[in-house]
Amino acid sequence: MQSKSIKGRSAEDIQNALLQSMADGFKPTLAIVFLSVSQDRKAVRDILDKAGIRIFGATTNGEFIDENPDKFSTAILLLDMDPGHFRILFSEYREKNYREVARALAAETKRFFHKPAFLISGTHLETDAEQLLLGFEDEVGKEVNVFGGMAGDDYTFSDQFVFTSDRETGKGMVVLALDEDKIKIRGRATCGWKAVGTEKTVTRSEGNHVFTVDDVPVLDLTSKYGGLENVTPENKDLLLEIAANLPLQLQRPVGDPVMRPGLVVDWKDRSFYCSGSVPQGSKVRFSVPPDFDVMEKVIRGVQELKQTQMPEADAVVVFSCAGRILSLGPLMNQEIEGVKKVWNVPMVGMFSNAELARATGGNLEMHNLTTCVVALKEK
């Protein structure tokens, strides 16, 4: 399978880059598209659709095809994958029936593939992304390979979108289903945020909606811990501060903890929605951003993935949390460059609102403040 990466700051840039990529006879059938909400999504979709290229697309908090992260742009991975080896699926979950929607999409995929694997992206800050993963697991089995990220919106925390050739939604998901008998897919999720302070108990929650921790409204406890000021609806930077710098760490009986930052505040009771489940009675700790050695940890993890599971790859897709670039700044370039060098094949990446992958303990998890690197190889 041949692949190429292109990028641009306008639909015209993408049109020119696409034509240039195809000048040598390359005929892509699939495009993984990551773009800013400021870009003309319809124009980009039309360009790819007219070229006969199927689309898996999501809006981002930043995008890249090499070691230089960009923003307010479009980044695309083009692949000439055999059309019989993949399907693009699309659905909305306006009733918050996340698990049922994912299960239905997985069941549809099983009509085509004996052993399906999935890249997924979803929207809306109230979405319990872990329920999406469980839906795929319900239908396909616990060993199913699912990787992805939740769409972004240039850090505005307002409206995110996923899209394909002829549809888009602000409350749903797009799925790239792969025939794993034909396409090998492997991934690695690496975090690095460090827990601080004592364990605290979630005393009231419903799914991904956390009301109180140690019987204190979770927003008040977070504000006190972080020394936040101006904790009001008028503070437009508050959500970014909570999500990027003050995430909860959900402790696990087995395996690494997973991150659960607050993304949407309910000001009536000072609760907030996380992007994954936080069970009532579970234990959480607060976090501090990682040291810069976390970049080396990510690169070592990807190198180990190559050595143990994926010696060769045709293309790489990266879902990296938006909070990482806020914490690491320009040094994020070093991490991306290190990942790129492992296989040295075309790559596309996005800065996402949540990352979806199999955790260290072996379970499918919704992550935050994590880098998820996915490698693809046509057999």
Image (cartoon, grey):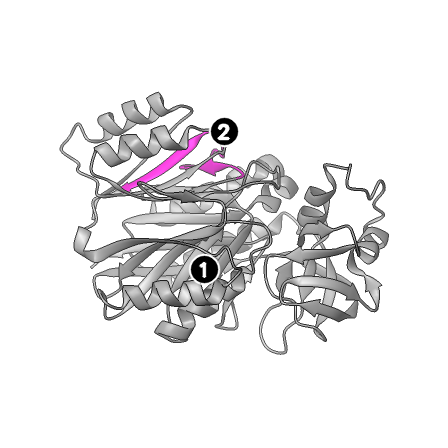
Image quadrant in which the C terminus is located: bottom left
Q: Residue at position x 55%, y 53% from top?
A: 354
Determine if residue 309 is in view.
no
Q: Residue at position x 70%, y 60% from top?
A: 248
In the image, which disc is placed on residue 143? none
Identified by mark 2, the residue type is Ser
- Please tell me which residue lies in front, 30 or 342: 30
In the image, which disc is placed on residue 38? 2
- Residue 104 x/y as whole percent: 37, 66
Horizontal placement of 284 versus 88: left or right?
right
Q: Is residue 203 above or below residue 271?
A: below
Looking at the image, the residue that sits furthest to the front is 95
Determine if residue 68 is in view.
yes
- Residue 154 x/y as whole percent: 56, 36
Horizontal placement of 215 versus 49: left or right?
right
Chain part drawn in magenta: 61-78
